[in-house]
Image (cartoon, rainbow, N blue to C red):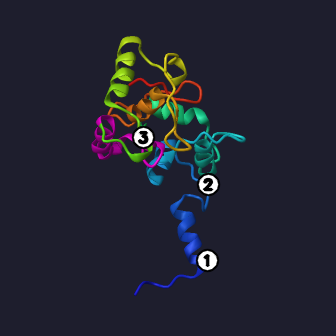
Amino acid sequence: MGTALTTGAARRIWLRAQLLHEPFPWDTLAAVAHLGYVQIDTINVIERAHHHILHSRMPAYQRAALHRAQTADKTVFETWTHALSYVPSADYRYFLPAMRERRTGPWPSWQTGITPEDVRRVVKRVRDTGPLMIRDIKDDVLVEKDWAWASRKPSKRARRAWSASPRPATTRRGRRPPCAR
């Protein structure tokens, strides 16, 4: 039988585990490492959600710190966890098997419609022209959605597979990472 906890004790344990019990003077990497990952989220009311996550734990957090951790320090990288996330670079090796599988298929059910040819086309374009964003691809032929949240652009689906590849994005331009590694 497990140990009984009061509601207050359980609350304190949960808040401490999430680094919400007191402000921490930690750096960005330490916070991401303690949490395991920080989901990159497009929700943007005052600021994008991943910046809220870090700021709520480190009141002195500046959004440039996450950019610096990814681009200059290379202490975090982007990969797919349950969604696109920042992960400590020290954990890179643990994500490699899943990254390789996602790059070559078989695709998860939410990525149906991605073909190896779609991925090859995006990879070739990146190699030929350098960093690219989905909005840079103007020659996509739209396809029917196979579920409500699916993308109609094959290149966007291929980019999702590419984002899980063993070559993580090293920067972001605007709100989206370039599809370059």
The numbered disc on residue 8 is 1
Q: Quadrant of the C terminus?
A: top left
Residue type at mark 3?
Gln
> Which one is earlier in the sequence, the residue at label 1 or at label 3?
1
- Dominant secondary structure, magenta: helix
Where is residue 155? Give x, y as percent: 45, 26
Residue located farthest toward the top when viewing the structure as drawn: 129
Q: Does the magenta stretch include residue 96?
A: yes
Residue type at mark 1?
Gly
What residue is disc 3 on? 111
Where is residue 152? Give x, y as percent: 52, 32
Q: Is residue 120 magenta?
A: no
Residue type at mark 2?
Pro
Magenta segment boundaries in residue numbering: 79-104
Judged left or right of residue 128, residue 178 is right
Give the number of the mark in front: 1 or 3.
Answer: 3
> Which one is earlier in the sequence, the residue at label 2 or at label 1?
1
Q: Quadrant of residue 110?
A: top left
Q: In the rendered image of this protein, does residue 72 appear above or below residue 41?
A: above
What residue is disc 2 on? 23
Q: What element carries label 2?
A: loop
Q: In which quarter of the image is the N terminus?
A: bottom left
